[in-house]
Amino acid sequence: MFIHIGDGHIINSENIIVMIDQQYVDSSSINEELIEYQKEQESESTIDQNTKTIVVTKNDVYYSPLTIQTLKKRTSLQAMIDHLNDYTDQDILE
């Protein structure tokens, strides 16, 4: 399933490795190293004051303006929609 993470990015949720709340990046040296490494790999840094969540996938790192809670709700809602069965009676619709 795909999820819209903001700023025009839609990613496959199966590719997500981790989502990190921006406010906790500085509290972990591993998180800081990950972000610094990504900044070195990119020609320009896309992290700014609007970034609330850092989404790490198999191939990229995305800086989302949405909170982790919002992204989690979107993922849960999409999973629920994907698993709904169609119980409509075809005879009624025809």
Image: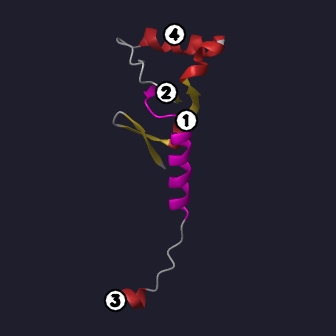
Tell me residue 37's x, y (percent): 51, 11
Amino acid of disc 1: Ile
Give the magenta range.
Answer: 60-83
Q: Residue at x 46, y 34 (%)?
A: 66
Left or right, residue 39 beside residue 79: left
Q: Looking at the rendered structure, which numbered label has been put on residue 94?
A: 3
Q: Residue at x 66, y 14 (%)?
A: 28
Around disc 3, counting alpha carbons within 10 Å, would you say few (fewer than 14), some (14 to 19), or many (20 or more)?
few
Tell me residue 77's x, y (percent): 52, 54
What secondary structure is the stretch in magenta mostly built from?
helix
Location of residue 80 by image quarter: bottom right
Amino acid of disc 3: Glu
Q: Which residue is mark 1?
A: 68
Give the Cα separation between the discs numbered 1 and 2.
Answer: 8 Å
Amino acid of disc 2: Lys
Q: Which residue is mark 4?
A: 36
Q: Is residue 15 above or below residue 39?
A: below
Give the Cα separation between the discs numbered 2 and 4.
Answer: 17 Å
N-terminal-most mark, 1 or 4: 4
N-terminal-most mark, 1 or 3: 1
Around disc 1, counting alpha carbons within 10 Å, would you say few (fewer than 14), some (14 to 19), or many (20 or more)?
some
N-terminal-most mark, 1 or 2: 2
Give the Cα separation between the discs numbered 1 and 3.
Answer: 43 Å
Left or right, residue 22 beside residue 48: right
| Discs 1, 2 touching: Cβ within 8 Å | yes
Around disc 4, counting alpha carbons within 10 Å, would you say few (fewer than 14), some (14 to 19), or many (20 or more)?
few
Q: Is residue 43 above or below residue 24?
A: above
